[in-house]
Image (spheres, rainbow, N blue to C red):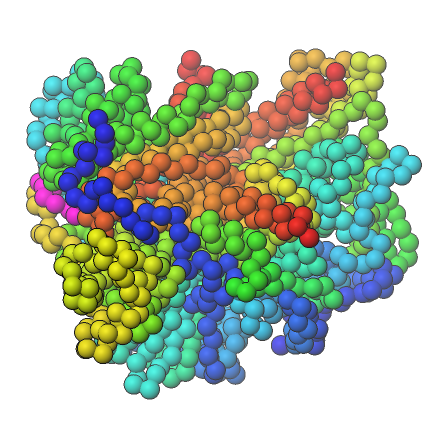
Amino acid sequence: MYANFDLLVPDELDQALTMIGGAKTAEDCAPLGGGTNLVVDMRASGKAPAALVSVARLPGLRGITIAEGTVTLGAATTVSDLLRDPRMLEVGAAMVDGSRVFAGQMVRNTATVAGNICCGSPAADLVPPLLALGASVTLRSAGGERTVPLDEYFTGYKTSVRRPDELLTSISWPVPAENSASRFYKLGRRKGDAITMVGVSVLVGMKDGVCSEVRIALGAVGPCVFRAKTAETVLKGKAPSPELVEQAARKAMEEAAPIDDVRATGAYRKQQVQVLVRRLLNQTIESLS
Amino acid sequence: MNKMDSAVPGEQNVSYRQIGKPRTRIDSPGKVFGKTPYAGDYVMPNMLHAKVLRSKLPSARMTRLDVSKARDLPGVACVLTYKDLKIGTVATDIPAQTGFRRRDTDQQILVDEIVRYQGEPIALVAAESVEIAEHALSLIEVELEPVPGVYDVFEAQKPDAPKVFGDDNIVASYKVRKGDVEAGFAAAETIVENTFRTQYIEHAFLEPEVGLGWEDEQGVINIRTSTQAVETFRYIADAIGIPHSKVRIRGALVGGGFGGKCDVTVELYIALLTLKTGRPVRLGYTREDSFYGHGKRHPFIISHKTGFAKDGRITASKIDITSESGPYAFMSPYVLMYATEAGPGPYLVDNVHIDSRSVATNNMYTSAFRGFGATQACIAYEQQMDEAAKVLGMDPIELRRINLLKTGDAIATGFEVQSAVWTEECMDRAWAALGEKPKDEGAIRYGHGIAAYQQGYGRMIWLHDTAEGWVGVEMDGTVVVRSGMTDIGAGQTSSLAQIAGELLGVDMMDITVYNSDSSTTPLAGTSSATRGLYMSGNAVRNAATAVRNRLAARAAQHFGVADSDIDFADSRVFVASDREKSLPFKELIATCASEGIHRSELAIFRAPFGDWIDPETGQGQVHPDYTYGAHAVQVAVDTETGEVTILKSVGAHDVGQCVNIAAVEGQIEGGVAQGHGYALSEELIYKDGCLVTPSLSEYLCPTSMDSPRIECIILESRSGLGPFGAKGIGEPGHTPAASAVANAVADAIGARVHDFPLTPEKIARAVSATRDNG
Amino acid sequence: MTNVKTRQLSVNGVKRTVDAPANETLLETLRRIGAVEVKCGCEKGDCGACAVLLDGEAVDSCLTLTGTVGERAITTVKGLGGAENPHPLQTAFADLGAAQCGYCTPGMIIATQSLLTNDTDTPDEADIRLALSGNLCRCTGYTKIYDAVLDGARAMREAEAAK
């Protein structure tokens, strides 16, 4: 049974910002995207914010634009939208990997990119690719707008820098440089519609024989999705070699702090971070040489 | 040798017009158009909505129960606790045709003092809406004082263990003593010992339990519900204290059962609330209710010690079997019997020694699940065969070939199988269908696995199983079948239409089947135990044959030929030797009607009856007959992550005779997918009796992404006891699939994971252990 | 019950006026007004039995709040066709044995229709397996469903070409 709440369905973004503007806490008023997480959570907990503001169908919030070297996703862009846009393979292959293993079709048709970020789950499947791609998010309130690197967005388990009066309105990342590649791999207890045991995304850019860009993001092995920055530095600016890749994979493993749960032990997750980081680095590097 | 010639002589070299064809089932159109009403789709005016309050603790003493606030809530019509029950218990025994019941296995309906499992019902609420009923649940004041429970079958057998069932926590135990097992081991060249464990499994039928009850003008409590067993009306009547004739269970097409809708669940609560309020009551379980509210598949721990002669022949088999029953008996004794009977598998073993027991704990109670214990037995004996082959340095196929039972050989209980035993043919064909094993590449290794099996069909013969069926012809030449059999999605009613249609020369789509009503359709027993087609198919065949014979006699008189020269097809009656001579079927019917010739028949089919096996030796007959076959699987295993991809999955089975080949394939394919999940991903995890996986995102059934195309190889020996020589296939298709997956994984990684399910983590660990040791 | 609002819904082309509270899901609303061909299997988006089309795109109606549906056209399996005008997917599912217990079938057909109209009308088996991974089936082992989707898609293309 759901708790009672007010459901507000604004017609325009400004209206939505006004509605959410009075919120002091997430319990007062919260944005409702596709609802594929929030509706389930409300049923499970029997708790709900006093009001929900439906933002999934606001005009101008859905769509993918690629301009001036930047890829921008409207907050209400769905996971299926990503899969249906052939340009996405060029500008964010890891996002395609993440979208393909994201829940099932109906959820992909409904769930929004912003919702996947805002739910704050450490197992969110689009967040590691976005971190690997170097994405930023735009947060907007009635008072103004700010852009936050996704890397600085999460502050802990299901917590973030987003204020209750702010909406996440868009996500953007620079079009990856020539000769760069990104991948995401999700390890689950089954292949379809699974909750992630370990999710790893990497982006590698090569220039003049060295790794000019390296980003490694890890999901489901900490309180939130995060970048394995020590591991990144192992390769960054260096010519890749099997030894360096292995070293980076080991560093990433050391940075992971997973818990035991019904899906896997922390020890297995840690070990798999090493396996998957090594694999994805090798795959991306091989695809570039 | 032509395998068809090796069948027991019977109906051979016959051709059928409808039987054996891949026909669209009569229930299919309604399902694809969204027109089929399921039990949860019925509503009635003035209907109340019910909810069940469950214990959050698995082992506790109830020190306080106060429902006054819930009763006072506006919109609440009724709150029932144990104090309101005239009779506090309900049968958990198999709802057999004889009415026999083991009274010592009854279960409390609502907790009166002691809670024995998490989710045990404490109170029932009926209210004007679901919301009010849920609100009322939250107003019930319950105090539960935890008491020490026992959550492990070995702990439960210790003398000082908390007592959950009887005075020793043993729900049932059996022995098999055949030949001289010590002499067999003495004669063995090699002895192989292994222990295998299986997990708690959920049926996860897509339709959660649901029903609607109402009292009719005769004071009969009617319950429209999703069930595999309308015969539970007797147990419900006993439990609510009214005559059997005053409870009527009306089924609907069932949204999946797999054994999980054989026991009494919602129907009893609905009956109690309907009786109390005099109003219609609907109770629909949520998915979470369903996880907490019906019995699961038994976890088993099975140890094999097997002796082999130099040539690979089994000289002795010693097997120890422990199953977990949870706190109440339900089907546990029978499931244990199946596992015991199937212990050594489809192999000829002269010296057998089996000890088995089902042990009570405070984990969730367990009951029927497709395969009914024979599946768990197969998981043990088929992994044991592969492990033995490894030790003996033999090919696993050849080791099996040497030991497979043949027609006339005695199984573990000494019973000599009379029907065709085509395990070898099935094994060879399934294995061949896998083709070449791909070459390993990097961390990916490929494996092939096989599993053969024996699965009884029909009830254990001491249950004296019967089924009735009625067939009649309408004035327009269409046909009506009446059968109490439930239709749980396997095409049960459609097969009855096909059988009656074959015999009466009427297309199955012109046949209406009324089924699953405990008061107006002749009782036929549950759709379980792979007995539906066998029992009800034979009953309907008997009835249709009687009608056909009477109609043929009248037609023979009309044409001036012998009765045996009359044939029925395409809604016409023919002279077989001169097909120019024919009549529309409905003209014959009109003649018969005007002359008072009986155009319908109520028939009964009786399975073989017998006594219990000898309790000291386990020798005797358990089942009427057995289905045999084999399953083969090709997997790719990622040795670093432990992920398994099933690439090929092939079931080969002797089904005796297909009635509807598409339905046969459907049963095999569906059973196989459940086997894939059993081996790899499905597991109900209980932590100190509390379920930690109560949703379909935590309990992982295979999705399409996990499921390759499944191949079926169907053989027809026409040697079974079912109609037209059919054997049962509802459970058998499932039985060997999980074992084959396990054997394929072990083949790929060169190591064995003895505990199901084979999760990526366990596989990765097994691979590392091999590396560490090697 | 609080926050009840009168809402207009378009269900299989028919305008329906319903009073739905803010916390009611589309699954609950549809079943309440008699569209019981939309099945309830888990109410958590784990099984797909409740799938309906919203403007041609499949969604889990158990995860959709009725108040967010707006003007969008709701299509259930009954809206695709019936005995008089069967949809090619319905024919294929029936004839190829893709419906066993049938409880997942309405959602399965809806998800397939969404795949064929929004993603590809010439799916291969990998496309099908990806598109149906949110629709659990416990009876068929999926094999006959793959066959039915391939066959139904072919029939749909042929029907389209014949136009």
Check the image and report above or below for A165 versus A113. below
Q: Residue at x 15, y 26 (%)?
A: B316
Q: Quadrant of residue B492?
A: bottom left
Query: Horizontal and vertical percent for residue B391?
Result: 28, 17
Q: Residue at x 42, y 60 (%)?
A: B27
Seen in the image, is B338 located left or right of residue B611? right
How many marks can you see?
A: 0
Of the pair B61 and B268, the residue shown nearer to us? B268
Q: Quadrant of residue C150?
A: top right
Query: Horizontal and vertical percent for residue B625?
Result: 18, 45
Query: Horizontal and vertical percent for residue A125?
Result: 66, 41
Of the pair B180 and A62, the residue shown nearer to us? A62
Seen in the image, is B550 located left or right of residue A106? left
Q: Which quadrant holds the C terminus of chain B?
A: top left
Q: Is residue B618 magenta?
A: yes
Visible in this render: residue A225? no
Q: Residue furthest bottom?
A: B217
Seen in the image, is A42 located left or right of residue B373? right
Seen in the image, is B708 located left or right of residue B653? right
Which residues are the magenta region?
B617-625
Q: Residue at x 18, y 51 (%)?
A: B460
